[in-house]
Amino acid sequence: MSNLSSPAQPAPWSCLRIHNRPVLHVASGGSAKTFLLGIFSGPLAAGATPSAVTYTEVPLRKLVWPLHHGDGRPAALLSLRLLLLPEPLLRSRGCVTSKDFQQLLQELEQEVGRRRRLGQESAARKAFIACSYHPARPEVYSSLQDAALAPEFIAAAEYSASPGSDLEGLLQRLETVSEEKRIYRVPVFTAKFCQTLLEELGHFEQSDMPKGRPNTMNNHGVLMHELGLDDPLVTPLRERFLLPLMALLYPDCGGGHLDSHRAFVVKYALGQDLELGCHYDNAELTLNVALGKDFTGGALYFGGLFQAPAALKETLEVDHVVGHGILHRGGQLHGARPLRTGERWNLVVWLRASTVRNRLCPMCCQKPDLVDDEGFGDGFTREEPAPVDVCVLT
């Protein structure tokens, strides 16, 4: 199968606009060393003028603007602005007195520092691993071979890249998990390759090498770029196979313009992470491949798109099949039920299209505010490629 042309890698820019929830900034106040923390009790729409706001003086050199996690949950603060949070939420978390607010802001400042160091620390780990780690299965670091892939996956990608291909023809080669939610399943890796990859991941896990968290919700697993598996494995998977598939399945979500990704393996086991809370991804599209091992429980569940009212009113549960990948939109609310026995390992690839996210950040649903970043960044570019239609709720 011939290689498709490789898109240029987006520069490492990240969006720092607030996750679009009931949080709003107002005009600054207070003295040079004291700012006002505004608390309101009702919802505020973006751009609205806050009313009936009470303020508490907070000694801090700077108040900063909330930054979302990479998975749809509000996280750090990063700007010289005031913070407004809904009073019931703060009080329900035990934040009542001025001392409580001060402690909250100290914790947020620490989170800001942690996030600012992420790129440098990740690059340092990757460099150390590259010169110090001895793989157990070095063959997985070779360029992706067709022998590692399920024949059905190769056939679906070849069909998608062929002249005259269409969605109807592709759907005959995939399993439609939910037509309404546009969730699909397809075999991706052979059982033999899954076993080989798991052996390598287990060997790395048992080593004394430094390890970064896969994301803010998963504590156990591997960042593929730090282990050195992005270039030989994930990038050709995206460029040669996923790009033509996604172009037919999700043309309105940038499926034909995927030019970057963030890939990681997550591990669930007794005494470690057991489940995954409801969230949505910092991605236009997502591939989630079950690698193994033996386990019970842990089914994925899906709701609606996160922007929709009552998006979790009716959920769909999907069991894992080793070697098979679930394809879905990044904005689809989803999570994982508790693991009951064994270990579950999954490869998750957040697929990104700068043509889409340059116009509309998938986290804050606004035009992104970009800042320089390091390492993989979040898939944004400063340039303005030819626009494509983005997903629109109807």
Image (spheres, rainbow, N blue to C red):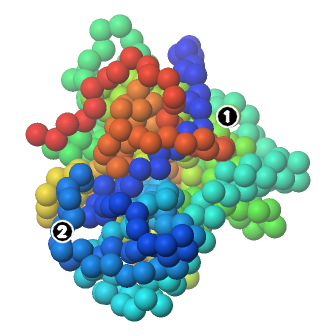
Q: Residue 123: percent from the left, percent from the top?
A: 74, 49
The percent coordinates of residue 42 (x first, y second) are: 17, 72
The residue drawn where x is 24% and y is 74% is 53
**Residue 183: in sight, yes or no?**
yes
Q: Which mark is residue 26?
A: none
Find residue 51 and name its label.
2
Q: Is residue 269 visible?
A: no
Instruction: Write down the residue under mark 1.
Output: 231
Looking at this rendering, what residue extends furthest in the front direction? 31
Judge left or right: residue 325 versus residue 328.
right
**For the residue marked with disc 2, what is the amino acid?**
Ser
Give the quadrant of the C terminus: top left
Q: Amino acid at mark 1?
A: Asp
Neighbor class of circle 1 (other Cα within 10 Å; few <14, some 14-19, many 20+) is some
Identify the residue at horizontal 36%, vertical 32% (top origin). 359
Which quarter of the figure has residue 283?
Answer: top left
> In terms of image quadrants, where is residue 236?
top right
Tell me which residue sits at (36%, 56%) in the image: 19
Q: Nearer the viewer, residue 306 or 23?
A: 23
- Return the residue found at the far left: 394
Residue 153 lies, in percent from the top left, at 44, 32
